[in-house]
């Protein structure tokens, strides 16, 4: 039994899963508290702020995160120093530019009447700056597959935030202002810890090379477009609901979105480990292993999602009550959650379609894929609101959006490698059976 525990803990999939469980668990607990101590309007404003922050972070993360993993994973020491130094240079430059834009919007905030937008403009710049060091360190650790350090950083960030929120809730001091301040301070704390422990390798800044910077820029311009478009895709519904139906309706819509963490946790874990594995295979010209990973990971996740979806479908009302509290009982949240969970069985294949296209240097196609999804989402969402005049008008757009992106990505990816739905399911089934058998055998030992 001791051998089983040690080997499990050293496994990168296990550590990645634990890390995502930690951050998602803290996130769900935080949301459950906020839904109970804040008004619907304040909860909606908080999610509105996070949406804008997410779009800005999509610029930095989209431009550099995939590029960091692709060019840094499995490379030589000298090349690694040049790549990481160039990433630091570009990350700092992008952060400065976006913060300057934030300041320019702040100057004209007196002419804005929307309260949620005013609050967002005031807190956006400093919050975005506070996450710079933490984010670059996170990308580097993913490329190095050092998920234990990632786990410690996530514990520092999310753990400190939830602890302070619990204290504020206990002393009845939980306000939107204090929440924004805590978010900023915990980012600063995590960045400071990463610096003190030497995780950042920020000194590689001096090893940056013009050629490497250009190489990352050329690759990143399409992954940037993909990431911004992906975040915009997720944000479109937020904007539509906020400006057409109000922040209170947004609070209801975000409940099932947050409950989707039940599938997003394992999905993010496998995407992180799968991306680094495929990048290493591509950089070492091992196309067989790259193809195998592109089938195995989504295939295994598809089978793993089926029992999760069944349980979530049956317990949707209970989940909504636990997360949101009694005031959200009887709203559309539970049935929207059922709708989203039903189609989540397609998430693994869709997500790995995009990752594989990036690794194969087809980031332009991945960018077009997201644009197709946006083109499918917008007309359906507006038409839905025009017909239903409630949150269901937006919710029904999700399946159409997912299917449009899945089919587009699949069609183009099959041009560049031996790739098919049938082989994903076959490999996923075989690997799932082997995982179950190995797990049972370890428990028997």
Image (spheres, helix red, strand yellow):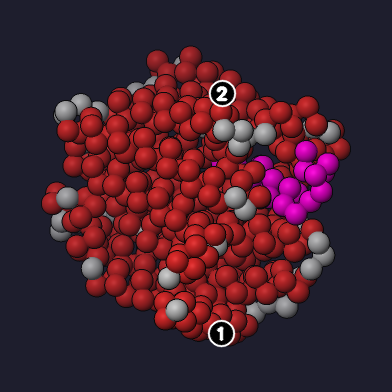
Q: Is residue 13 magenta?
A: no
Q: Is residue 357 visible?
A: no
- Residue position marked by numbered label 2 in the rendering: 99
Q: Residue at x 33, y 57 (%)?
A: 259
178 with respect to 94 (left or right): left
Q: Quadrant of residue 430?
A: bottom right
Whichever of callouts 1 and 2 sits on the residue coming sooner in the sequence is 2
* Percent position of residue 79, x then y: 82, 43
Q: Residue at x 47, y 18 (%)?
A: 106
Q: For the magenta stretch, what is the residue range?
A: 58-81
Instruction: Say the numbered circle drawn on residue 386.
Output: none
Q: Quadrant of residue 308?
A: bottom left
Q: 32 or 430: which is nearer to us?
A: 430
Q: Is residue 76 magenta?
A: yes
Q: Secondary structure at mark 2?
A: helix
Q: Quadrant of the C terminus?
A: bottom left
| Cα–Cα span, label 1 and label 2 | 49 Å
Q: Secondary structure at mark 1?
A: helix
* Percent position of residue 425, x then y: 56, 82
Q: Quadrant of residue 97?
A: top right
Q: 39 or 314: which is nearer to us?
A: 314
- Residue position marked by numbered label 1 in the rendering: 430
* Percent position of residue 86, x then y: 75, 35
148 with respect to 343 (left or right): right
Please, is residue 354 above or below residue 194 in the view? Answer: below
Q: Which class describes the residues within 10 Å of circle 2: few (<14), some (14-19), or many (20+)? A: some
Q: Residue at x 29, y 32 (%)?
A: 164
* Percent position of residue 58, x then y: 56, 42
């Amino acid at each position: 039994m001791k051998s089983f525990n040690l080997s499990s803990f050293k496994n990168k999939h296990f550590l990645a899963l634990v890390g995502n469980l930690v951050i998602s668990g803290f996130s769900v607990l935080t949301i459950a508290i906020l839904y109970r101590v804040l008004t619907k309007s304040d909860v909606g404003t908080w999610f509105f702020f996070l949406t804008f922050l997410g779009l800005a972070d999509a610029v930095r993360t989209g431009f550099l995160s995939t590029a960091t993993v692709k060019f840094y994973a499995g490379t030589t020491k000298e090349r690694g120093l040049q790549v990481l130094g160039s990433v630091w240079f570009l990350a700092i430059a992008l952060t400065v530019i976006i913060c300057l834009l934030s300041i320019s919007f702040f100057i004209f905030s007196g002419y804005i009447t929307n309260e949620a937008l005013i609050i967002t403009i005031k807190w956006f710049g400093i919050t975005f700056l506070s996450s710079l060091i933490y984010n670059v360190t996170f990308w580097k650790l993913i490329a190095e597959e050092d998920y234990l350090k990632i786990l410690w950083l996530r514990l520092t960030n999310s753990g400190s935030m939830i602890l302070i929120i619990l204290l504020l809730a206990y002393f009845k001091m939980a306000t939107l202002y204090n929440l924004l301040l805590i978010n900023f301070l915990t980012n600063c704390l995590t960045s400071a810890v990463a610096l003190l422990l030497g995780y950042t390798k920020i000194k590689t800044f001096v090893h940056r090379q013009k050629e490497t910077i250009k190489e990352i820029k050329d690759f990143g311009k399409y992954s940037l477009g993909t990431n911004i478009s992906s975040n915009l895709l997720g944000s479109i519904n937020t904007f539509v609901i906020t400006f057409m139906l109000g922040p209170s309706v947004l609070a209801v819509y975000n409940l099932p979105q947050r409950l989707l963490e039940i599938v997003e946790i394992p999905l993010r874990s496998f995407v992180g480990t799968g991306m680094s594995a495929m990048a290493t295979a591509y950089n070492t010209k091992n196309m067989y292993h790259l193809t195998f990973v592109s089938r195995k990971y989504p295939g295994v996740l598809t089978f793993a999602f089926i029992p999760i979806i069944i349980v979530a479908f049956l317990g949707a009302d209970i989940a909504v009550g636990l997360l949101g509290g009694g005031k959200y009982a009887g709203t559309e949240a539970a049935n929207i959650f059922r709708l989203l969970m039903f189609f989540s069985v397609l998430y693994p294949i869709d997500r790995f379609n995009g990752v594989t296209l990036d690794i194969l240097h087809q980031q332009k196609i991945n960018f077009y894929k997201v644009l197709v999804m946006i083109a499918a989402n917008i007309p359906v969402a507006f038409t839905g609101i025009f017909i239903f005049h409630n949150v269901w008008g937006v919710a029904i757009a999700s399946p159409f959006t997912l299917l449009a992106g899945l089919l587009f990505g699949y069609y183009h990816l099959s041009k560049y490698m031996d790739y098919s739905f049938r082989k994903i399911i076959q490999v996923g089934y075989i690997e799932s059976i082997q995982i179950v058998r190995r797990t049972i055998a370890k428990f028997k030992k």
